[in-house]
Image (cartoon, helix red, strand yellow):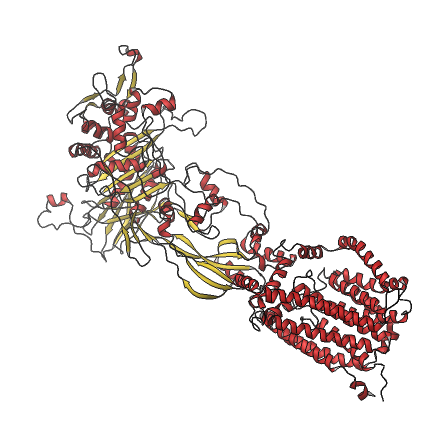
């Protein structure tokens, strides 16, 4: 059984992932060159990758359908993780998300996967009812508690990722286009309410994005420097570890939020295009798994993973290109960060688990 | 609406992703391919900077090569706003730590300091209460990568602590900047001036001349200002690659080196300057005054040898960035220590002015040396409209009227005795005698340089005032009367002059009628010491007074020292010519709305003495002013004598003329000079007597082992360690000093110079005492 199972393992998916991680480690290495304090980050990233890949194989070996029966405990953990972070944060006075340049364990990363599983289970159970608005709203109730807790941390970007996960999954589950437009309208109406409850820095970032001349030192500074870094890269880039914007630190948060700019500057259009192609291949393989899934539960899990990955990649790259406001959304597999990397490798394990158990009858 | 098939949904999902990524690739292509050059330029602009290399400012020396001003490194703490932590709390922590280290508040809103700015100050320094660290950083937000100066002249220890903690103080940098070190400090501050930040209101002008108002310091007063263009040098330039904090990574290409500023060698003789300051300081203190001036110049060239204006200030305070408290103290001092009174102060010149009517009257043929008048102490000037009514006549006094009269008086005795009556008559006329009249008196005053700038190369000079009929009519709406000419003749009334003008006029009398432009710079050299410009005398004019007539004025001035009003300036071994002055002035220090007077109803007076020596072939011209000091003869002349004794030290080798004239008796060896080394002397106080003057007197002898007085032993007297006076024993082995001021120091020391084995004498000085001391040789 075991050997037959592994025959369907998606090696293209794995290979692409390893290529992406390798590219990421190289860029992290380059962006921490001039900073002795951060010199160990590329090696740490390698350790996280090895660890994450190990977990991925374990997850792949487990039948994803096994998770169906644990919907409730999983959901409890989904709520408990951000709640604990919030409580600890209250005790240590703010700074829940990034403790330092190195970062710390970020439980909300894991929340994404857990929520995908919970939502997939709910939508699979009610797949005949998704056409009814009532069930769309009921599914929304699942994501509101963890989203709210994460938003309060305050971590707007992860909360937005959760919303996107829900939105794509509900769509992929078969929501009606009419309901989509109703929801869209509701969203527009809710915008002022969200604006009022936002923290100052969030509003500042959005304002800076809309009016970049304002505040040269703050967020606009980073966006400008990122654009200069990418633009100066040209076709082939300025050479690995030779980007002046990166190496002379005009570019900030190089190893996390702005990794893509370092890559764009040093490896040029060709390098950035290579990254995008690798990401597209990755998404292709994951959606392939979705279409091959033997049941709706698996289909929706793969869709959720693809949605997360696609949204984070697009949001991060668009931010680097100055098309979206500055957010703390890391570029999957590239940006430095153990929590994010391991989470995505777990997600890939789930996808592998789905591909390995697809419907086609084996003889 | 029908629900879509899952496979179709995946296709749509994939297409959507492809489209979105395509959009990103288009933007990527636009930035990296289409706009590549623009962003490459921007990246280069980020990392390459054209920076200037500061040129070391020129060094300033005295005429003998003593360094007066040099540059020294100082530590400046700056903050690069862009490098500060983004987190508010961390930023606050950096500010708080820096605040503790530098003793600057974290936050202090700006406020306008109180206190007045002296009007005569050539250039006010930067004048604002230092804001807090936050406010300073806030000012720099417009250019977040440029360092904002937080503190200058930081102590070395503090600078090292900041360097050590640089990991905890992101954005904080320590830079080494050269600042001026004024080695001679107070002693020469009015001559040298100081450098400082470019005053805000004059920034435009300086930018045109190539300065950076944010970082450059410029001369603000003194020769630092007048010779700014010589001293500043030329900045170099280099292209550097910098990181985000502006730290230099490397130099790109060949730097263009800076050319150091030129050095100045002043005409000032530092030792003479020191002697002048010491003598003047003691003198004004003894006179109960607070302010005074002494200037010495070479009358043959116009070189200024020394220039002291008291009270002074330490220009190092300005070089190091003056504190508000210090600046307030200096600028609100009623005696204006920041002002160089030698060239800026306007005073009635008093009787020192009489050399002008004397020379004028001779040249115009008003008088001959034989012309004689009679001084009765009072001159009754008849009323213009009632010339026959003695009741209406106006009295004009000679200074001597309180004690008597001068009787018959001529030009030489008129100058020597400073007889006012003589000069009233000569200048304003009396009865049938026609005097010079205002026009001719004013003309000669102008010829001698009054009422116009001397053109000395120092900023802030005043032209003074030589009044005219028109001036009086416009200013006072009154016509000019003979009495005004009388007053002007004795340097009173409307006439106002600077000490330098009187000195320059004196020098012209001394040198035979050439009025030189006073100069203070002897040479300009480049950094390698090559002479670029050397002193050349500049003649303002040849005064049209004949040599014979000037010789007569000199004779009168010599007579003043020999037997006239200036006998206190007599020095046995050099002939001095001089003119005293006691100039009444109006002041209202008690603010009662009336001019202050003493108990006898006399106005306060400035004590003047102007002189040159040797009288026959003048090497030095000297002027001393003690503001509100009293009589010129009592107060100013002794100070001048002390200074001249420094310039012409008593001949220390060979027996003095008297000893030569009377050879030592047979068999008795002439008193021999002490061997330079090895002769032990002991010191003792022989007696202490009471005397009437408050300043105590010291009289002493130096005797050899046989009890014979030793001539020519050099004596040094200091007050609590501060050298005050140097003299030498006379042919009989005596020496004396009559200005022991108990309030200057209670402990005075007397030393024999060049005799290391000699004991030092310590005196506990009390006022109203006369100390007799003896240094006596003992067997080794």
Q: Position of residue B363 (x, y in %)?
A: 19, 29
Residue situated in front as seen by the camera: B519 or A342: A342
Where, by quadrant of the figure, is residue B501 drawn? Answer: top left
Where, by quadrant of the figure, is residue A39 drawn? Answer: bottom right
Q: Position of residue B215 (x, y in %)?
A: 47, 53
Quarter of the C terminus of chain A within the rendering: bottom right
- Residue under the point 77% across and 83% down: A9
- Residue B71 is left or right of residue A73, and the answer is left
- Residue under the point 81% across and 75% down: A290
- Residue A48 is left or right of residue B553, and the answer is right
Where, by quadrant of the figure, is residue B464 drawn? Answer: top left
Residue situated in front as seen by the camera: B764 or B384: B384
Residue situated in front as seen by the camera: B231 or A139: A139
Q: Position of residue B401 (x, y in %)?
A: 27, 22
> Total of numbered circles in the picture?
0
- Residue under the point 69% across and 61% down: A324
Quarter of the N terminus of chain A within the rendering: bottom right
- Residue B77 visible, this orientation: yes
State the residue lying farthest toward the left: B666
Say above or below: A5 vs A207.
below
- Residue A110 visible, this orientation: no
Say above or below: B366 vs B448.
above
């Amino acid at each position: 059984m075991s050997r037959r199972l592994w025959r369907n393992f998606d090696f293209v998916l794995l290979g692409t992932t390893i290529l992406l991680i390798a590219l990421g480690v190289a860029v992290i290495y380059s962006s921490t060159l001039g900073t002795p304090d951060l010199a160990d980050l590329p090696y740490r990233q390698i350790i996280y990758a090895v660890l994450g890949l190990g977990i991925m194989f374990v997850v792949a070996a487990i039948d994803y359908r096994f998770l169906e029966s644990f919907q409730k405990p999983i959901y409890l953990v989904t709520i408990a993780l951000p709640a604990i972070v919030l409580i600890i944060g209250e005790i240590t006075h703010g700074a829940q998300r990034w403790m330092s340049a190195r970062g710390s364990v970020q439980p909300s990363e894991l929340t994404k996967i857990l929520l995908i599983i919970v939502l997939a289970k709910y939508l699979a159970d009610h797949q005949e009812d998704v056409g009814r608005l009532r069930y769309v709203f009921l599914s929304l109730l699942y994501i509101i508690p963890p989203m709210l807790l994460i938003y309060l941390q305050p971590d707007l970007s992860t909360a937005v990722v959760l919303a996107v996960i829900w939105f794509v999954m509900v769509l992929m589950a078969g929501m009606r286009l009419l309901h989509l437009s109703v929801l869209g309208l509701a969203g527009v109406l809710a915008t002022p309410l969200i604006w009022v409850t936002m923290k100052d820095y969030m509003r500042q970032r959005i304002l800076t994005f809309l009016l970049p001349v304002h505040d040269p030192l703050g967020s606009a500074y980073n966006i400008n420097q990122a654009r200069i870094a990418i633009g100066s890269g040209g076709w082939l880039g300025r050479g690995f570890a030779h980007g002046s914007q990166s190496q002379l630190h005009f570019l900030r948060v190089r190893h996390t939020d702005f990794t893509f700019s370092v890559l764009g500057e040093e490896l040029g259009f060709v390098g950035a295009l290579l990254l995008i192609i690798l990401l597209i291949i990755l998404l292709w393989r994951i959606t392939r798994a979705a279409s091959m899934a033997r049941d709706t539960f698996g289909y929706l899990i793969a869709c959720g993973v693809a949605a997360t990955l696609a949204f984070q990649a697009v949001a991060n790259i668009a931010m680097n290109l100055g098309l979206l406001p500055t957010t703390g959304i890391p570029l999957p597999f590239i940006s430095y960060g153990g929590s994010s990397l391991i989470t995505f490798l777990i997600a890939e394990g789930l996808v592998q688990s789905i591909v390995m158990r697809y419907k086609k009858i084996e003889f | 609406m029908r629900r879509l098939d899952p496979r179709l949904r995946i296709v749509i999902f994939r297409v959507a992703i492809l489209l979105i990524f395509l959009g990103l690739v288009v933007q990527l292509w636009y930035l990296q391919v289409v706009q590549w050059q623009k962003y490459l330029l921007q990246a280069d602009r980020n990392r390459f900077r054209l920076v200037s290399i500061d040129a070391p400012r020129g060094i300033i020396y005295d005429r003998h090569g003593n360094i007066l001003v040099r540059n020294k490194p100082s530590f400046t703490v700056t903050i690069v706003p862009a490098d500060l932590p983004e987190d508010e709390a961390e930023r606050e922590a950096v500010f708080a730590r820096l605040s503790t280290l530098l003793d600057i508040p974290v936050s202090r809103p700006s406020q306008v300091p109180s206190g007045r700015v002296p009007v005569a100050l050539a250039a006010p320094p930067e004048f604002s209460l230092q804001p807090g660290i936050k406010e300073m950083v806030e000012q720099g937000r417009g250019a977040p990568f440029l360092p904002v100066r937080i503190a200058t002249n930081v102590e070395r220890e503090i600078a090292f602590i900041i360097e050590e903690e640089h990991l905890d103080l992101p954005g904080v940098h320590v830079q080494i900047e050269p600042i001026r070190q004024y080695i001679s400090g107070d002693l020469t501050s009015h001559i040298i001036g100081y450098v400082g930040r470019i005053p805000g209101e004059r920034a435009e002008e300086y930018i045109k001349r190539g300065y950076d108002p944010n970082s450059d310091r410029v001369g603000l007063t003194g020769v630092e200002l007048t010779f700014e263009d010589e001293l500043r040098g030329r900045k170099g330039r280099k292209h550097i690659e910098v990181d985000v904090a502006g730290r230099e990574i490397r130099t790109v290409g060949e730097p263009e080196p800076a050319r150091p500023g030129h050095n100045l060698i002043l005409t000032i003789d530092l030792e003479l300057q020191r002697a002048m300051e010491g003598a003047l300081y003691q003198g004004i203190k003894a006179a109960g005054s607070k302010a005074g001036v002494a200037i010495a110049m070479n009358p043959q060239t116009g070189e200024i040898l020394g220039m002291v204006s008291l009270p002074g200030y330490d220009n190092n305070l300005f070089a190091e960035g003056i504190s508000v408290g210090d600046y307030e103290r200096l600028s609100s001092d009623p005696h204006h220590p920041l002002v160089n009174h030698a060239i800026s102060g306007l005073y009635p010149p008093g009787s020192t002015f009489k050399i002008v009517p004397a020379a004028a009257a001779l040249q115009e043929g008003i008088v001959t040396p034989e012309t004689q008048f009679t001084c009765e102490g009072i001159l009754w000037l008849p009323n213009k409209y009632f010339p026959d009514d003695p009741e209406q006549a106006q009295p004009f006094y000679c200074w001597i009227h309180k004690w008597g009269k001068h009787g018959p008086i001529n030009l030489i005795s008129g100058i020597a005795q400073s007889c006012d009556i003589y000069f009233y008559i000569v200048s304003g006329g009396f009865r049938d005698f026609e005097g010079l009249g205002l026009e001719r008196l004013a003309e000669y005053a102008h010829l001698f340089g009054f009422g116009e700038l001397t053109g000395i190369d120092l900023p802030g000079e005043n032209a003074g005032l030589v009044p005219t009929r028109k001036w009086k009519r416009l200013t006072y709406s009154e016509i000019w009367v003979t009495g005004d000419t009388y007053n002007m003749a004795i340097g009173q009334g409307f006439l106002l002059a600077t000490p330098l003008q009187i000195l320059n006029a004196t020098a012209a009398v001394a040198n035979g009628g050439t009025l030189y432009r006073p100069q203070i710079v002897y040479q300009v050299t480049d950094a390698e010491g090559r002479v670029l410009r050397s002193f050349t005398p500049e003649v303002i004019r040849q005064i049209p007074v004949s040599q014979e007539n000037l010789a007569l004025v000199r004779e009168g001035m010599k007579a003043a020292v020999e037997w006239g009003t200036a006998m206190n300036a007599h020095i046995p071994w050099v002939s001095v010519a001089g003119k005293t002055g006691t100039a009444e002035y109006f002041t209202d220090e008690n603010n009662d709305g009336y001019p202050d007077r003493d108990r006898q109803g006399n106005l306060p007076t400035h004590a003047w003495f102007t002189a040159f020596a040797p009288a026959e072939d003048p090497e030095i011209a000297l002027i001393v002013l003690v503001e509100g000091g009293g009589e010129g003869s009592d107060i100013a002349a002794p100070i001048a004598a002390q200074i001249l004794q420094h310039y012409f030290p008593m001949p220390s080798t060979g027996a003095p003329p008297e000893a030569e004239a009377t050879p030592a008796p047979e068999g008795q060896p002439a008193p021999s000079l002490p061997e330079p080394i090895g002769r032990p002397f002991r010191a003792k106080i022989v007696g202490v007597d009471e005397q009437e003057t408050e300043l105590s007197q010291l009289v002493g002898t130096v005797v050899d082992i046989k009890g014979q007085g030793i001539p020519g032993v050099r004596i040094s007297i200091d007050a609590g360690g501060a050298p005050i006076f140097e003299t030498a024993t006379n042919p009989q082995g005596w020496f004396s000093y009559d200005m022991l001021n108990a309030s200057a120091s209670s402990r005075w020391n007397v030393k024999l110079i060049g005799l290391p084995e000699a004991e030092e004498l310590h005196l506990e000085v009390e006022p109203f005492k006369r100390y007799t001391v003896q240094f006596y040789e003992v067997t080794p």
